[in-house]
Image: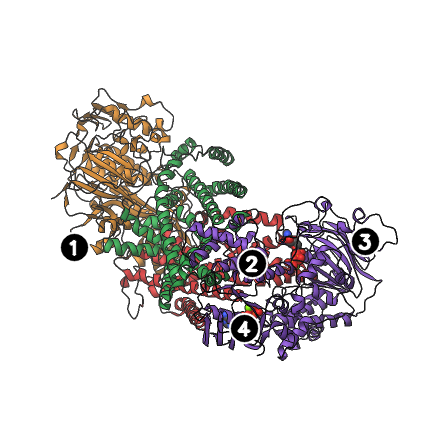
Amino acid sequence: TQAPETDGADSRITVAINSDTGSMDPAGSIALTYLAYSVSALDELLTYDENGEIEYRAAESFEVNEAYTEWTFHLREDALWSDGSEVTAADFLNTITRALDPASGSGYAVYLFPIENAEEIYNGEAQMDSLGVDTPDEHTLVFHLEKPCVYFLDLLRLPVYTPSCEKYADAVDSGWATDPERSLANGPFYLAEYVPDQYFVLKKNENYWNEDAVKLDQITYRFFDDTQSMANAYEAGEVDVATSLPSTVMQLYEGKEDLMVTDQIATRYIYFNLNVEPLDDVRVRRAINLALNREELCQIVGADTEPTYNLVAKYMKDRSTGEYFVDGAPQPFEENAELARELLAEAGYPDGEGFPVLTYSYPTLEMDSDTAQVIKEQLKETLNIDIELRAQELQANYSTRYAGDFDMCRMNWTADFADPYTYLSMLLSNSTYNCSGINDPEYDSLVEQSDSQTDPVKRSELLHAAEQRAVGEEFYIIPLYAMKSVNLVNPDITGIRQIPASGALEYRYAEKGQ
Amino acid sequence: MLRYAVKRIMTGILSLFVLATVTFFLVRLIPGSPFMSGGVSQSVVEAIEEEYGLNEPLPVQYLSYMAGLLQGDLGISYQDPGTSVTEIIARAWPLTASLGTAALIVSLLAGTGLGILKVMSRKKAVGHMISAAGMAAAGIPGFAAAILLLLVFSVKLKLFPASGLYTLSSYVLPVISLSLYPTAVITRMMANALAAEMGKEYVLFARAKGLGRGRIVLTHALKNAFLPVLSYAGPAFAYLLTGSFVVESIFTIPGLGREFVDSISSRDYTLILGLTVFMGTVVILVNLAADLLAACLDPRIRRNFAGREG
Amino acid sequence: MGNTKGHLAGRNRYGAVCCAVLAVWIILAVCVPVFGPYSWSEQNARIQNLGPSFSHLFGTDRFGRDIFTRVWYGAGISLLVGMASALINGCIGVAVGAVSGYAGRAADMILMRAADIIASIPSMLYVILITLVMGAGVFSIILGLCVAGWIDMARIVRGEIIRLKNSDFALAARMEGIPSMRILFRHLLPNAAGPAAVNLIFLIPQAVFTEAFLSFLGVGIAAPAASLGTIIQEARSQMIVYPYQMICPLVVLCVMLLALNGIGTLVEERIAGVRCE
Amino acid sequence: MKGFNRQKEHVLDVQNLVVSYHSGITAVRGISFFVNPGEIVGIAGESGSGKSTAMLAVMGLLDGKGKVLSGEIAVRGCRPVPGQNTAMIFQDSLNCLNPTLTVGRQIAETVRNRRKCSRKEAYARAEELLDLVGIRSPKMRMKQYPFELSGGMRQRTVIAAALACEPDLIIADEPTTALDAAVQAQILLLLKRLVKETGTSLLFVSHDLGAVAALCGRVYIMYQGEIVEGGITEEVFRNPSAAYTRQLLKDAGAKTVPSGPADPDQVLLRAEGLTKVFDTREGIEEISFAIRRGEIFGLVGESGSGKTTLARLLCGILTPDRGEIFLDGELLNPRGRRKEQLKKIQMVFQDPYGSLNPRLTAGQALEEALKAAGVRDRFSRREKAEEMLCLTGLSREDARRFPSEFSGGQRQRIGIARALILEPELLICDEALSSLDVSVQEQILGLLLDIWKNKGLSCLFISHDMHMVRRISTGIGVMYRGWMVEKGSTGKVCSDPWHPYTKQLLDAVPEADPVKARRIKAPVSAEGTEVFPDDQGKEQSGCPFVSRCGYALDCCRTGVPGIYRFGDREVRCFLYSEEYSGKRGSGYRMTSQI
Ligand SMILES: Nc1ncnc2c1ncn2[C@@H]1O[C@H](COP(=O)(O)OP(=O)(O)OP(=O)(O)O)[C@@H](O)[C@H]1O
Ligand SMILES: Nc1ncnc2c1ncn2[C@@H]1O[C@H](COP(=O)(O)OP(=O)(O)OP(=O)(O)O)[C@@H](O)[C@H]1O
Ligand SMILES: [Mg+2]
Ligand SMILES: [Mg+2]
């Protein structure tokens, strides 16, 4: 095996990423690899910068009609693929049409459903030509939506809205996405080499329209199996950047320049299975929620966690105010062990007597295993109820969840796009993520109203109300904690940005100081 | 000898058949689907499963898989769309194989050397030291040894790379961790066998003929003492060649072992099966090779190979 | 052997040390969790990650649990897994080997082919699959270890039985009209006991080893129960900051493996010695 | 010590040698002896008397095992250097050669070790040496491995390797003990010839007084680490001065004439046309004979002639391919006998170590048999077992001891007790005495004869030692390669052998009498050249003995002789066929044709 070239010119960096199987095709069943690749190599139409301002990338401008149902994007005329050919609207359409074939396995196809007929096409009920996307000319892309969608711009950073070169990107399984010859980029970097399971190399795209702003010559991504190995590799000087490291790294690098802690737009929480007695009783759910001591939990699980009492990610910002969204309303509930015991007694289980043993299913990740053990202890201590821990391998945990074969089940959600809707939609009665039997018309209608509410303040109120109902009144879930990402970055490197939507790092305008 | 080899190969093929069959049905028992992941709805999963023919009755799937297998087609990996299982093996195995071969060579050389030293050395302390080191090496679990080596030699001392298998120096730590245990075993076996050999009458006779101790060890005893070692080295090599997940994971080497565990956790049925069949083949072939080699070394077996049973 | 006497005495001392260590380990594994001042599962966030001290000999882990107690509890589980699986494997192996060796012909053929097939499986696969299908836990680990663990034993016993079957004393027993079963159990098996015992003893550290390895993979014993392997695995992420959390259980595990291996080696040499005579 | 004239120039001169093992045993307690140039000197003595220890000490090969406490050893005035001025041959030729190296290489390396020469020269020399020790087509043999050679050839190879050292002295430690009588005779004659041709001296160690008598000019007798007597062989054998020597000689030359309760008419066991051929195409063919009640029937034949196979067929351990066995006139079912029938025939095995279950005490082993026979009462079982032990010359306490705590002779007694406890009618002794010392042999033989007399047993006595069988049996069968070539009453067969093989057997065994022993003969073919009893295995038609037969006819090579009966005598040889001896009238009395 050839070593990836990492030394030499100083404008090269090596980044450690989690190895992951899966496709680099935006229309496919994408993997973490894709996310790492796309932030450097692909230009989406537009995105938001850290201050909530629109930053145009592949598009130069856009228009939207009054009803928020027709979005027109004007593509940059000087945008070129890395082989020098023009980026056209058809390239964007290419990804969309391919993703709407269920066989592609795209997990993001649902985010195309706001587009007219997309859902029908996906379900095989309509023809592709009825799709509500128009390309009146090579540089214009028009989306017709079924109903108003205020957060549509946020969706544009998702893989299914990014372009894939029509010339080569034909099918998910043709392997074009990892073939440097065929995998073209319209962003600052292009794929120069791809060695499965080991590394891939991005090189500076000379045809990029904003080439001057790009300082790095090369980014090498090396795959790692686990975060511990990444930390070791960073320590040994083999990589310049290592992300999502274990929390102990914080202790180890305390006060050093290398340490870079960023917010993750994610929430870890637990689903109650509402079809199971006694979890169908809101008093029981509330009791459990109030009984937990999240401060203690976070203290044990790691310094990279912080208690949360919301479903919406703690660190998600509300663009209209620039504040954290969850701070825009009072905390949905307060922990209270005393009250919890009373509630449990009210529900017919004084001091936990007669309370059945509930099983808690969680994947065998270290963090979840720690969490589970703490929760078990805490519930035993405060409510005197027993929880049976069911550690499952990740895949098994998924299938348990989908089968509804659990009493309580661990869930973690990282935002797909920077809007609370990505969280709140999960509890809708018809959501695919709703596997706990929630069926709450009132909640559904609150969330639905927010969809078309164009006034940010009013929309925000609606969303807060929905969250309050789900989390603070009905206690459908147990929010646990929000996470920070512990990263190590070579202090020589500057200009690394954080993507507001997901909290991931972006290196396209980074620089390696001399 | 040829007949024996043919017979063994036939048994091997039968073994592989049974192995593939059992594994085929066993993997389907694991909860989960290859296409289920956090963000995909049930209907999508079903659609893809249909695409891959996973919705057909199991026996039909089984037959078509076996038909493919007969033609040497291991199928397409589910997780890596567009990549065939053969390709995955072809890129993972060279890493594992080079590592395993290096580890085997190291442990054979070191083990044999230390074994000879232990038997031949006139100083008792040397023997005791070798025994103690061997005991320790056999007592420390491989993962612990690998982690400690990594911590000390690459994280702290920065002598060797901590990950990957890109340069020659990156072989050092994984090879050491892999060969620690086999070296200990081979040393012990070698020393025992050699000591036993040295007590035999032919050695006494060789001494009576005036041969020196060194000559006797090298030309007479070593070869005979090597036979029992070979019976260990064969399976051990097979084990090394099929990948040690721990070492591969700790040193971030995308070899077979890691591929294997990944395939299980992602429910990549064809990949699990393909890897199992491949590993089974390697095990069978390596063991066969070891037996044939033993036969070559031992004329008693070589000359009348007829009735040897496993 | 010239210095046989001194040699054997040294061996004896060494063997005695190994046995004593194992005995101490077993006693600690039983007593510490039962009679110790701390529970192996109770958490206390206030005393997280304390270093070793008088009140907590091995310190505490990130849950504030006493590592000393947990380590011995884990050692108990490890030993339990090791011994139980060794015992089961031993029984299966002896049974299969004895039948195969004594009956010969078709039974031998079938059993040995089955063993060949199982032996050609990467056995880790089956262990992982079983723990996945059945869920993590002591039982599935033991089951997983028993898929292929008996094969060596069966081969050894078979070889011994075949050798003994044609020995003069077995022929004499047949001439005396002693029933086959009795010949097998009273006359042949006790004579095969030596190699079988060696194998059995070596099966224990092997199983402990494998269990630790599986726990390391994350398919071992389910939390909060723990074996030494899981404790080591849990401590791995904090290894650099709190090395003692990993080193303590590791040392306990290594010493346990050493003692078990030592006893095995000793028994092996004893038996080899007896055979030479 | 009498009658030797000590020469100035001894090849080997050992003075006052004391050797002790680290275990504390002083195995050699101050012995002195010497060897003159070109002389063959014997050292004889029972097992454990320290012969091997003394020889190893002379060679300096005791290694870490033992230490020479005092004594002077000189070979032509110098220190003995193995491979230079001395060489040694050991008893077990199979183990003396490295199983995984070719014979040629093992000799050549010795040559090269002795003198600096090229590999090619060494191989040429090795070939010469093999030729010298009488191995035919040495070129081919050089490429073979030890296990591919017969015992005799291996012993020759070992001798060749020793000669490659070009030593002044060769020490041969029981070089013939593991061999057949015929092969032994050849080796003895070979050694004699080599000493004459090469001029080396030979120190010949053996517990077999016959072999010593046949070979040595001078002899030392060792007993418990000391030399009790030494001198010219004839004198020592004629007028032994030490009591121990007298005892040895008496045991070796003892004559027992069995007079037992033989009942000539009552046939206990009859075998008809027994045939058993193994996959290797060896086995026994068409064997018929009968044992009468109270008779001792002797079965002799070289190793591999099928004696054990026959015994096992009789016991029911093996099932015959063809043929029938009648016990007390009753046909035995070849597929499985009834328990009473099983226990009527019991066997005493050759190897006293393998025939007892090491995990059972003597008492338990005996009780096992009784238990199987249905004796329920524990006390009577124990009583019976202890009685049996007493009967075989052991004590009651011995019942609680394990086999490993007994000596070989004692174990053989337990083996006999085990065989007798079921009160069999026929006792088969399969080389029951072969592995024992002469004196122990005598004791056990005496015991067996006593029991035979008192219990009215019949006995099938198997041995490869013609003299032993001759002493005790009334009837005798001579086996060769699965055939029973001659059968008759012991007296007649031994004094007047008819089959050429029987004659060879009788000729090859040296007796403990120097004069008689020097007349031993090795097998000689019709052409008068030496033949190799070890060159077996090549498939041939006709009589299997033809290659070794000095009387072979043309028909012997092509046809298979039938069994020719003359009264109670049967011979399987064409010399006694009608074609050869002509048509015979009814009154014709056949005489020996050889
Ligand atoms: N390696 C040894 N360690 C301790 N004692 C030994 C050893 N070898 C032999 N002996 C003892 O030394 C004594 C002499 O043994 P040695 O082998 O010299 O007898 P031997 O006359 O050659 O007997 P044999 O005819 O059986 O070969 C015996 O009592 C024996 O038990
Ligand atoms: N179980 C067997 N399978 C194959 N061949 C056998 C078997 N038992 C004996 N033989 C062969 O049959 C021939 C006769 O063997 P047997 O043991 O009866 O000879 P023996 O006269 O008792 O020899 P010895 O004096 O060495 O005991 C030998 O050539 C032997 O190799
Ligand atoms: Mg001796
Ligand atoms: Mg025999």
Pinpoint residue A165: horizontal percent, then vertical percent: 26, 27
Numbered label attached to residue A255 = 1
Quick one: quadrant of the N terminus of chain D? Answer: bottom right
Q: What residue do we see at 12% from left, 33% from top?
A: A212
Label 1: state its secondary structure.
Answer: loop
Quick one: quadrant of the C terminus of chain D? Answer: bottom right
Q: Report the mark closest to the observer, 2 or 1.
A: 2
Question: Label 4 is placed on what type of residue?
Answer: Gly
* Residue carrying label 3: D565
Distance of mark 1 from mark 3, alpha carbons? 112 Å
Instruction: Judge: label 3 CB < 8 Å from ligand 2.
Output: no
Q: Is residue A144 visible?
A: no
Distance of mark 1 from mark 4, alpha carbons? 82 Å
Asked whether the residues under the numbered discs 2 and 1 touch, taking CB atoms below 8 Å apart as contact, a structural biologist would say no
Q: Are marks 1 and 4 on the same chain?
A: no
Label 2: state its secondary structure.
Answer: helix
Numbered label attached to residue D50 = 4
Distance of mark 4 from mark 3, alpha carbons? 50 Å
* Residue carrying label 2: D155
Pinpoint residue D531: horizontal percent, then vertical percent: 63, 53
Chain in purple (letter): D
Q: What residue do we see at 45% from left, 56% from top?
A: D111
Q: Earlier in the sequence, mark 4 or mark 2?
A: 4
Chain in orange (letter): A
Chain in green (letter): B
Q: Report the mark closest to the observer, 1 or 3.
A: 3
Residue A356 image-quadrant placement = bottom left
Q: Is residue A262 above or below residue B200?
A: above
